[in-house]
Image (cartoon, helix red, strand yellow):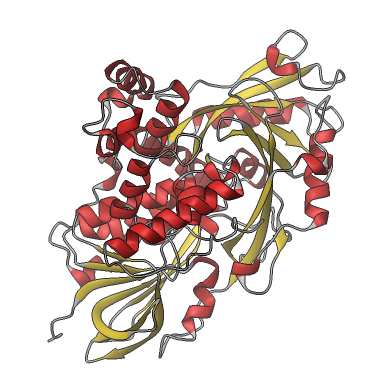
Amino acid sequence: MTQDADVDLFVIGGGVNGAGIARDAAGRGLSVLLCEQGDLASATSSASSKLIHGGLRYLEYLQFRFVRDALIEREILLAAAPHIVWPLRFILPWEKELRPRWMIALGLFLYDRLAPRRRLAGSDWLDLRQRPEGTPLTARLATGFSYSDCAVDDARLVVLNALDARERGAQIETRTRFISAAREDGLWRIGLMSAEGTERTLTARALVNAGGPWASTLMSAISGASAGKALRLVRGGHIVTPKLYEGDHAYILQNPDGRVVFVLPFAQHFSLIGTTEIPFEGNPAEAAISDGEIAYLLGAVSRYFRKPPAPEDIVHSFSGVRPLYDDKAASASAASREFILDLHQPPGEAPLLSVLGGKITTYRRLAEAAIDGLASHLAPPRPEPWTAAAPLPGGDMEDGDFDLFLHRLQESRPWLPAKLALRLARAYGTLVVKILRGARGLSDLGEDFGCGLTRAEIDYLMDKEWASTAEDVLWRRSKLGLVLSPVEAARVQAYMVERAGAQTQEPHSAEPEPPPRD
């Protein structure tokens, strides 16, 4: 008989897949510990294109089931988190030299019908000469198409899953490095190291490797683990510029090489342009966009926009490494975004589940499948899947109506500036009451560090959301790093260090960290 373990499930990796798995498992009554070597969503899961989408272009590769599954998840996430997932209308200008009109029309017809749509409008044909969406585009672009997908605050999606996991009993340990794991007496014996260098061991009945682009590297620290299935690492670069056009819609731009580039509204005042797909080798933490990738993205935009951005207009850039399952596709663009759950369990031994591939849209489905796959070994007290109908923290709004929630927030707190109310509502949803509770005016929220980032918000992020550095607050919990000055950012870091010290928490460096992957 297997002896008692410290936890039922140990999860390596604080990205969206790891956090989603921890949440699902904790909600089924399992004891869970998740460790992350840095901050939550500090790598791939905060360096995405910020989209929840079916993947229109994958229809070209006849991946109908994959697209259908993603479209189903799009609806589930839109209902579960209407504050951090919201509808986004895409404009696809048509160029006859590229994909024929019939092909695009057929693709959109299928996209509208592969899965039920409850909240999103269907596709349409556009006369760009008569529509405001055509105003920023070059004169040669007379017609196009429109369709719906969703935007997402990717880093906050991770944090909200971790929050829900903790509320359901999971332990979430950031700044904690996984050192080793070995099977012993039917359990996993796992070594960990804190940021200060303190080592400890614990036991678990099952181990999940959700290390993202580090998943293959981690296998070398897991005794007795086979190499398993292979990963294909692909670097995706993005640039951010001042807003290129008026409106809340997005553009999807075809390129002569067959790829597409997105231009998305971002952080209220900016446009996000991406992404590239470059094979990657090396340390994912050191991934950075190249000059060639920047030129590629700017070139794509210049084909379509009357006033395209220049290199000097770029205010920020980032690059993330996507860990795709290596299906031997001819190119990174053609490689499948489907996830693979690789289970390794010799007879009588504790199971190891490695997560390969996937995309942010299907993380919930991946997590559900992971716990279903481990259920026979772990025997969760509540075995049935549950996350499809459960809101994420802050998403429990009446009828899932974000606009109504925002209206009532502003109505109840008329002293809250409109732009600040929108930012707080988007980031926290109904959790915003934890920041605003008791405040009768802006001064009650404490010092404003710039652009409405108050002491009350920082305190909440430190106390409830694992934030410990200015980078955590400015580049993941918010995108205020785009608008705060270096002096303001340094003041945020100094305050956080001062507060942590006053509360006798673990000390952190007083030096402000640079923006990630600039």
216 vs 295: above or below: below
Image quarter in which the N terminus is found? bottom left
Report x, y in % for residue 214.
Answer: 53, 72
301 vs 183: above or below: above
Q: Residue at x 44, y 62 (%)?
A: 39
7 vs 330: above or below: below
Visible in this render: residue 262? yes
Q: Nearer the viewer, residue 406 or 149?
A: 406
Q: Nearer the viewer, residue 356 or 130?
A: 130
On the rendered structure, is 51 left or right of 19?
A: right
On the rendered structure, is 6 left or right of 229?
A: left
Q: Residue at x 46, y 51 (%)?
A: 492
Visible in this render: residue 189? no
Report x, y in % for residue 283.
Answer: 62, 73
Q: Quadrant of residue 7?
A: bottom left
Q: Residue at x 66, y 20 (%)?
A: 246
Image quarter in which the C terminus is found? bottom right
Q: Nearer the viewer, residue 421 or 281?
A: 421
Q: Residue at x 65, y 41 (%)?
A: 57
On the rendered structure, is 30 left or right of 127?
A: left
Q: Quadrant of residue 51?
A: top right
Label count reads: 0
